[in-house]
């Protein structure tokens, strides 16, 4: 490939899908089978940007447009059904579609060889070039959320049979995943080499997309996991397609205030708030076999999640953060009141449930999608029943 080539685009003119839930005729039989029970989704105000990015010495993997389209449409339905099950309506992330029903994937070629965009360090160079491409093609940037897919490297370490080399993680409102020859929905759930490989990479694809849509790691209670399987934003990237995998209500609460999930006509300018909401009052108490949280916060708060976890708390050490979506209402003063009762016997996955340090993380969500996290450490073994746990002065960190 000529070195003079810097950035190119092969992006079809996008048209609105004519019927939400319609399955394009050219999709393969397995995709049609899996999408046969598609639900009608609300029309989105904003769409997810889909970028297929290659170094200047590589080409996209064969048949990528059809394969990635089928995988994304199925994933859109999965998220939409989980939103509906959790009481947030038939809403999912928006996808721009081409005239034939494929997803509108923009193919961008980078300035450098593919090894300049390696796992762990290459995302910054890639993001910089994608943002430059958006500046040259402003009509193609449909939201603040961008999903970047790169083909697997083909060298002594990686191949279509052992994919890798490229970034594969969430990074703010960007997320990265990979493509390879058998990355095809026809293998979903199959007990074959291709099926097992697909669960690994498609489960990761679904999980990392969650991060790019504002979701933190979290899991469900003992009862949730018994009833519904594995939380996608916990260890669900290892089960997706093979065994029941679900979104927690807390994850769906965040998505309901995410730019690419809101319905057409939403008036908010997303991620524009800088000042943290006000916490007017907070009570956190152990009472019998429960933990009880009650908050009074300012009116811009749309939702409140509570996460119980034990140390270490760092990202990638927080898969066991057990999530609870608070009930939220408005009081006579126009403030928001939020509360939740957490049964201690639902926290069995935590190592230190009966003794030692734990933390309550309170996540406040605004209507325009900005999130603020407040961590309250505590030790149940030192906590008298009915005596409020010291919440300290609220310190709210933006963007979590």
Image (spheres, rainbow, N blue to C red):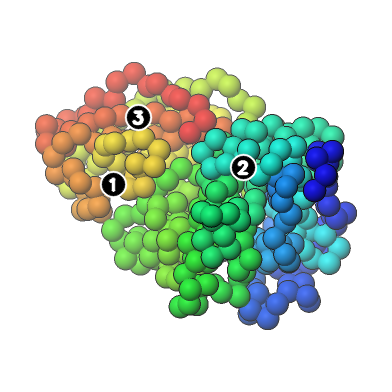
* In this rendering, position of residue 309 left or right of residue 161: left
User: How far apart are labels 2 and 3 at the CA level?
Assistant: 39 Å
98 or 262: nearer the eye?
Answer: 98
In front of the other: 170 or 386? 170
Name the front one of labels 2 and 3: 2
Which residue does the image show at 34% across and 41% down from the upper left?
317
Whether residue 272 is situated above or below residue 184 in the rendered picture: above
The residue wearing badge 2 is 115
Report how far apart the C-alphas of labels 3 and 1 lie in the structure: 16 Å
Secondary structure of the residue carrying numbered label 1: strand
Label 1 to label 2: alpha-carbon separation: 48 Å
**N-term-proximal mark, 3 vs 1:** 1
Which residue was labeled with disc 3? Answer: 375
Query: Mark 2 or 3 closer to N-term?
Result: 2
Confirm whether residue 340 shows in the render: no
Which x, y percent locates residue 260?
A: 66, 46
Tell me where residue 113 sits by quadrant: top right
Residue 139 is situated, as x and y percent measured from the top left of the image, at 84, 41
- Residue 109 in picture, x, y percent from top left: 76, 45
Can you give x and y, in whole percent of width and height, for residue 57 in the image? Answer: 73, 47
Residue at image point 32% right, 65% down:
226
């Amino acid at each position: 490939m000529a070195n003079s080539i810097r950035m190119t685009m092969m992006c079809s003119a996008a048209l609105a899908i004519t019927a939400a839930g319609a399955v394009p005729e050219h999709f393969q039989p397995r995709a049609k089978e899996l999408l046969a029970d598609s639900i009608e989704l609300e029309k989105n105000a904003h769409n997810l940007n889909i970028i297929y990015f290659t170094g200047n010495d590589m080409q996209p993997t064969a048949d990528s447009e059809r394969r990635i389209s089928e995988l994304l449409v199925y994933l859109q339905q999965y998220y939409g059904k989980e939103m509906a099950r959790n009481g947030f309506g038939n809403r999912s992330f928006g996808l721009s579609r081409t005239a034939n029903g494929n997803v509108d994937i923009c193919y961008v070629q980078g300035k450098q060889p593919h090894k300049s965009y390696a796992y762990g360090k290459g995302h910054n160079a890639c993001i910089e070039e994608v943002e430059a491409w958006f500046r040259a093609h402003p009509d193609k940037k449909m939201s603040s959320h961008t999903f970047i897919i790169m083909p697997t490297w083909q060298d002594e370490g990686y191949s279509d049979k052992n994919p890798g080399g490229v970034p594969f993680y969430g990074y703010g409102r960007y997320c990265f995943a990979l493509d390879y020859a058998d990355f095809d929905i026809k293998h979903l759930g199959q007990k074959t080499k291709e099926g097992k490989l697909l669960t690994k990479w498609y489960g990761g694809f679904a999980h990392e997309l969650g991060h790019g849509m504002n979701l933190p790691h979290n899991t469900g209670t003992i009862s949730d996991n018994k009833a519904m399987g594995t939380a996608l934003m916990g260890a669900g990237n290892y089960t997706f397609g093979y065994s029941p995998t679900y979104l927690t209500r807390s994850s769906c609460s965040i998505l309901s205030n995410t730019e690419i999930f809101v319905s057409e006509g939403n008036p908010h300018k997303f991620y524009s708030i800088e000042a943290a909401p006000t916490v007017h009052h907070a009570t956190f108490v152990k009472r019998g076999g429960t933990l009880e949280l009650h908050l009074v916060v300012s009116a811009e708060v749309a939702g409140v999640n509570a996460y119980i976890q034990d140390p270490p708390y760092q990202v990638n050490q927080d898969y066991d953060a057990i999530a609870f979506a608070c009930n939220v209402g408005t009081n006579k003063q126009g403030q928001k009141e939020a509360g939740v009762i957490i049964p201690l016997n639902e926290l069995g996955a935590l190592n230190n449930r009966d003794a030692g340090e734990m933390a309550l993380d309170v996540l406040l969500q605004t209507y325009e999608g900005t999130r603020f996290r407040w961590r309250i450490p505590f030790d149940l073994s030192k906590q008298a029943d009915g005596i409020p746990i010291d919440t300290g002065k609220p310190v709210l960190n933006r963007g979590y």
